Amino acid sequence: MKSPMAAVSAYEEDGIYFRVYQVRHRIKVYARMGKKAVIEHGSTPDQAAVKAKRRLMSL
């Protein structure tokens, strides 16, 4: 059986590690900086990454 969650890509930007997932028909981004991590969803990987970065910086 195929897993519904598969990592599409991973990259690092401004000291933040991003991992992009496609879960069924949604895009989710896992963002981690040090010991802080957040997961955000969006319609595009870029939109989700911006939301995750904004939320991570506010913690």
Image (spheres, grey):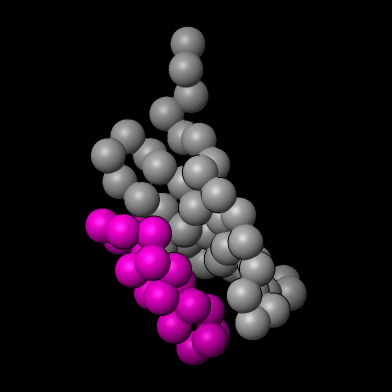
Residue 52 sits in quarter: bottom left
Q: Residue furthest top?
A: 1
As drawn, 42 above or below 34: above
Residue 42 sits in quarter: bottom left
Relative to 12, 45 lies left or right: left
Residue visible at 47% across and 11% down in the picture: 1
Q: Residue furthest right?
A: 34
Q: Does the magenta portion include 46?
A: yes
Residue visible at 47% across and 35% down in the picture: 5
As drawn, 24 above or below 47: above
Relative to 55, 32 lies left or right: right
Residue visible at 36% across and 50% down in the picture: 27
Residue 35 sits in quarter: bottom right
Residue 36 visible, this orientation: no
Residue 24 location (% of width, % of height): 32, 34
Relative to 54, 47 lies left or right: left
Which segment did they paint magenta? Answer: 41-59
Q: Residue furthest bottom?
A: 58
Q: Does the magenta portion include 4?
A: no
Relative to 1, 44 lies left or right: left
